[in-house]
Amino acid sequence: MEKENLIKKIKKLKRKREAIIIAHVYQRDEIQKIADFTGDSLFLSRVAMNTKAKVILFCGVRFMAETAAVLNPDKIVLIPEKNAGCPLADTITPSKLKEKKREYPEARVVSYVNSSAEIKAESDLCCTSANAIEVVNSLKEEQILFVPDKNLGRFVASHTDKDVILWDGFCYVHHLCIKAEDIKEMKIKHPRAKVIVHPECPEEIINMADFIGSTSQMADYVSKSNSQEFIVGTEIGMLFNLKFHNPEKRFYPASEKAICEDMKLTTLEKIASSLEKMEYQVKVPKKIEIKAKKSLNKMLEIKHENKR
Ligand code: 13P
Ligand code: SF4
């Protein structure tokens, strides 16, 4: 079907189903364009919680849609592509986490939202890349077991006096696809550009950055900055969002290879089909949902400055 007709079909189905479409900023440009809301994981969790819509169509990866389902047990949460996962989230299983918890019985477990509902259920509280430092510092305990992203964990450790034990997980997009050489080259090409990177990047990339933050924090930094050019060290979908909100500024990807394959699995065709067939519904077993919700709510209760 032609793109325009497909968009018309999606809009019609959206009204029929009383649905909203929310999309992460790593989604394809055409999906970000038709979404009712775009943003980072924390922002989208809040949108999902506050919406009056009956159906939440989540364009992102499974853990994000699962988070929306846990926070909204009475709503229907759909994911257009059932195989959209997150290799970082897959680096940890409940049994491996239980084993680690036995090793560190005094530690409080903070899980990055990029994890399954089972992992959230096994955690004391959750965090996103936008609030990880605040979450860890909000705890009175000294020892923190931070899972599953070691780069975000190390970034947090550098901003707290707490003893942060890291899990050996990473996101291949940020850890492997963006190289120090790429940034060096881009800085030579664009000497006036500010380097902004996601905390899932490895230490040597973090050390080269002018600003480190979650996708929404990057967006905020860019809109407030006097600089006109930016080298962007995160998944390339973010560039659409930055250009859209700052048409007068220029953006260069730190690496064209920084592509999350799972994020790109969602297409307009799959969105239309999802609303038409009401699939794939994301459901979390009640026992896990209750425990995961506790960890998520503790995070959401922490006052957060970045509301975007
Ligand atoms: P944000 O929470 O910054 O949007 O990041 C989510 C993610 O998947 C990063 O790889
Ligand atoms: Fe997971 Fe990385 Fe993709 Fe984010 S960019 S969803 S952390 S694989």
Image (cartoon, grey):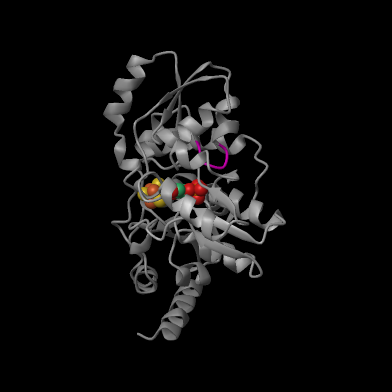
x, y percent for residue 32:
50, 67
x, y percent for residue 124:
47, 27
Instruction: Name the one closer to the observer, 76 or 78.
Output: 78
Q: Is residue 304 left or right of residue 238?
A: right
Q: How many marks?
A: 0
Is residue 147 depicted above or below 252 in this figure?
A: above
Looking at the image, which residue sits at the far top?
A: 106
Is residue 54 depicted above or below 209 in this figure?
A: below
Residue 162 among those drawn in magenta: no
Q: Which residues are magenta?
A: 127-131
Please give the name of the residue rendered at 38% of the width and 86% of the height, measured from the top-left corner. Answer: 2
Q: Main secondary structure of the magenta part?
A: loop
Instruction: Name the one closer to the observer, 111 or 214.
Output: 214
Please give the name of the residue rendered at 51% of the width and 74% of the height, measured from the top-left corner. Answer: 15
Instruction: Name the one closer to the observer, 290 or 215.
Output: 215
Q: Is residue 216 left or right of residue 65?
A: right
* Residue 128 appears in view: no
* Residue 42 appears in view: yes
Q: Quadrant of the N terminus?
A: bottom left
Please give the name of the residue rendered at 55% of the width and 44% of the height, measured from the top-left corner. Answer: 209
